[in-house]
């Protein structure tokens, strides 16, 4: 009989402990899920912006006499460098530096876009003699 009482007390204490632990951890699960979702959204925003620039560069390569103009939403914490035939994108996701490098068959005018505040900008990609010029200018 005492063995049955000990088992029931242990089972009751285990259930009590799980109840207390779950009541403490459940409020934080929503915060953790939201944090992970924000990281994914940031990555999608960066990749969308990088693809916009890539499409513009490819358009200029195919249509050498035309300019590419588009309004773009510049994300926060993004640094862009164009030199030689390389476009280098540096951005922060969850306080980690991520670098994406794209290489092209055409050469760029050396330009850097660093510490630009997020907002709506005009993306202007054109050809100056044999070099591609990428310009991101404020719409204000």
Image: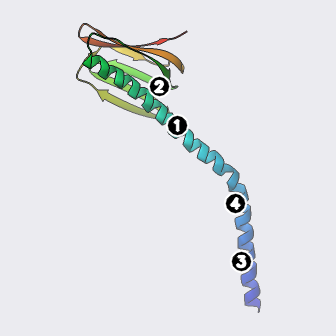
Tell which circle, 2 or 4, labels the residue nearer the N-terminal end: 4
Residue 38 in percent (x, y) is at: 56, 38
Choose the circle earlier in sequence order: 4 or 3.
Answer: 3
Residue 84 shows in this picture: no
Horizontal side of 13 relative to 134 (left or right) equals right
Q: Nearer the viewer, mark 1 or mark 4?
A: 1
Question: Looking at this rendering, what residue extends furthest in the bottom direction?
Answer: 1
Find disc 3 in the rendering and name its residue: 11
**Label 2 secondary element:** strand
Residue drawn at (51%, 25%) of the image:
75
- Mark 1 touching mark 3, by CB under 8 A? no
> Whole-percent x and y of residue 29?
64, 51
Whether residue 61 is visible to the viewer of this picture, yes or no, is yes
- 1 or 4: tag closer to the N-terminus: 4
Q: CA distance from mark 1 to mark 3?
A: 44 Å
In this rendering, which labeled residue sits more in front, label 1 or label 3? Answer: 1
Image check: 31 left or right of 123?
right
Neighbour class for label 3 at 10 Å: few (<14), some, many (≥20)? few
Q: Which residue is mark 1?
A: 41
Q: CA distance from mark 2 to mark 1?
A: 15 Å
Dot 3: what SS? helix
Query: CA separation, marks 2 and 4?
Result: 39 Å
Q: Quadrant of residue 59?
A: top left
Which residue is identified by label 2?
78
From the image, tell me which residue sits under label 4.
Answer: 22
Q: Is residue 5 left or right of residue 70?
A: right
Q: CA distance from mark 2 to mark 3?
A: 54 Å
**Residue at image coords 34%, 11%:** 67
Q: Earlier in the sequence, mark 2 or mark 1?
A: 1
Q: Position of residue 5 (x, y in %)?
A: 77, 86
Residue 117: image tag: none
The mark that comes first in sequence, 1 or 3, is 3
């Amino acid at each position: 009989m005492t063995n049955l009482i000990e088992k029931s007390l242990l089972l009751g204490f285990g259930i009590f402990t799980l109840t207390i632990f779950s009541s403490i951890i459940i409020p934080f699960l929503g915060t953790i899920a939201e944090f992970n979702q924000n990281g994914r959204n940031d990555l999608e925003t960066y990749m969308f912006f990088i693809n916009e620039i890539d499409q513009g560069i490819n358009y200029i390569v195919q249509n050498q006499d035309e300019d590419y103009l588009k309004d773009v939403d510049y994300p926060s914490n993004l640094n862009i460098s164009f030199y030689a035939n390389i476009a280098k994108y540096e951005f922060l996701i969850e306080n980690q530096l991520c670098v994406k490098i794209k290489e092209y068959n055409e050469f760029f005018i050396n330009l850097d876009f660093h510490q630009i505040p997020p907002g709506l900008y005009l993306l202007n990609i054109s050809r100056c003699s044999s070099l591609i010029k990428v310009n991101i200018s404020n719409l204000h």
